[in-house]
Amino acid sequence: MTTQPKRVMLIDDDATVLGVVGDLLHAGGYAVQLLLYPTLAVPTAKTFRPDVVLADLHMPVMTGREVLHSFKAFDETRDVPVVLFTSTWTPGEMMRSFLAGAVDLWTKPLVPDHVDRLGELLTAIDELPQSKRALGRERLRSMFLRYHAQEKSHGTLLLNPGTPFEGRVILDKGQFSFARLGPIYGEPALDEMLTLDDGVWRWDADVIVPPSNEPPPATAAAGYVPKVLLVDDDAAVRKLVTKQLERAGFKVETAEHGEDGQRKALTLDLDAVIADLNMPVLDGWGMLRALKAELRTREIPVLVLSAHDDYRETLAAARAGAHDYLRKTGHSDELVKRVKQLTAARVRVRELLEKAKPIKRLEVSLVGAQWLMRTLSELDCTAVVDAEDDWGNYRIRVDRGQLREVTAQADAKQLSGQHALTAFLVSRGAMAHVSFEMPPPSEPAPPWLSESIDEALRHLQAMEARVLGDRLAKVGGFTVDAELAGLFARIGSESEVALLRAVAEEKVAPAALAQHLGLDAERVREGLRELVRRGVLRLS
């Protein structure tokens, strides 16, 4: 009996690639369907019934990940394996593609070795029991590890680098050797990391040594005292912890409950917040949400205290935006050590800025974009900040503490002035280089950088309030920037891209988004905030 050849559907907007790769697949014994227009992927797949789909990640109109999402929406195509390929994989694109359900990731140009790899992949899928073909934790982990084994990856994959809840996966010549996320180690840590679709990912090549649990403590820059807000309803705890922190060199403000803490956080320039989870009026969870929703306070590192020692609550705190989690034991030594760790990056960076020493690689999330800009202004620095994230590139020139020039480039879209400054202030996962210059002979012109930041935040906060307010209970209150939406579709998390699609294409009313997407209301609100912050949504 003659065995039917496996059917492969190849999707690429480049006719030359279709021709060359199509010939390779034909020569490998596959039945091939070539598709130049990704918008026809689902109807074509319903008739061709492919055993596997190969799709270019970066295509106009519809990306490879969007093709994958469209397949998941129909019973006839939901289980079709999809391989994505592109010229260069960033860590973020790689992880978002796996989380979307891609079974393998290839790097262009596609060559005969890829045809062999396809055969191995199809054999592995055929041998997989039907019960394990759904995209669960086990299959996702298996695909992730299989990919890195084939690529012989050698280095460390970082999730949310620089934060106390930083995740690390170490791969030694393709072999999985170490993983840690907060209090979890090994495969369970990797599984948890693979559920965080909105994280910032970074790859450190050739770094395969597990990190020390004891980072060196930082000493405060001359004359600089880190400021901490302690929020706890127990007066005895406030008194004891305040004394311990002041003895360790911190300036401490206190609040009795979350509502009081939130008010003080808005008016004080804080380097860290310590908050009990269980408080009256507004508990630690509510305060954490409020701090992260407010632009002025979203960067402040928050350490939450709990009477429990539960890793699930630890992970819940991390997902809610906490930087660290500590069980209340009555011993303050560990608390002081954790607060020193939370504030160490700001202390180190401020010392370098005070001495006008260049900073070659600064993980901006360690200190916060707002804090970096305000500190440059406060210290009357004359400096240039060059930064880059998945969204684009940023350049900010500061002349003796005043804003001289700011530009941002997102794909082909160029921004300047307040729009560019706003783009940097809301950046995620940016890496920056800070260099110093001699002040120009002329006096700097207003505005002060700190004033520009305040103006940008006021404008953005007002926009967010209107987008999330009653005005948008019905469709039609805003417009979508198509160019930025296309970029966001490539770099956003799975839930963010689904939200964008529901708003921009399906025209779902904001009030109905949570039910339509199966997300909780707070997740939808945060997603809408991100779309506004990035300039994807604008009020009509």
Image (cartoon, helix red, strand yellow):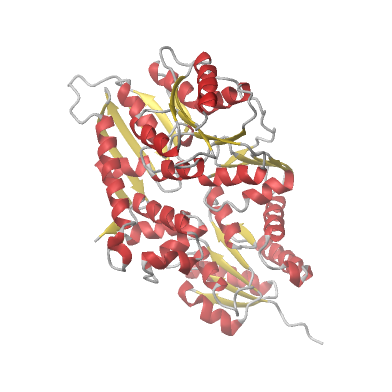
- Image side of residue 379 versus residue 285, left or right: left
Q: Please indicate, yes or no, whether residue 23 appears anywhere in the rendered image.
A: yes
Q: Nearer the viewer, residue 235 or 248?
A: 235
Relative to 169, residue 447 above or below: above
Q: Position of residue 60 (x, y in %)?
A: 42, 65
Q: Please indicate, yes or no, whether residue 109 appears anywhere in the rendered image.
A: no
Relative to 152, residue 517 above or below: below
Q: Nearer the viewer, residue 216 or 389?
A: 216
Relative to 225, residue 327 above or below: below
- Residue at image location 60% in from the left, 21% down from the top: 216
Q: Position of residue 176 (x, y in %)?
A: 73, 45
Q: Quadrant of the C terminus?
A: bottom left
Q: Nearer the viewer, residue 68 or 61?
A: 68
Figure label count = 0
- Residue at image location 67% in from the left, 75% down from the top: 30
The residue most toward the bottom is: 1
Q: Position of residue 199 (x, y in %)?
A: 53, 47
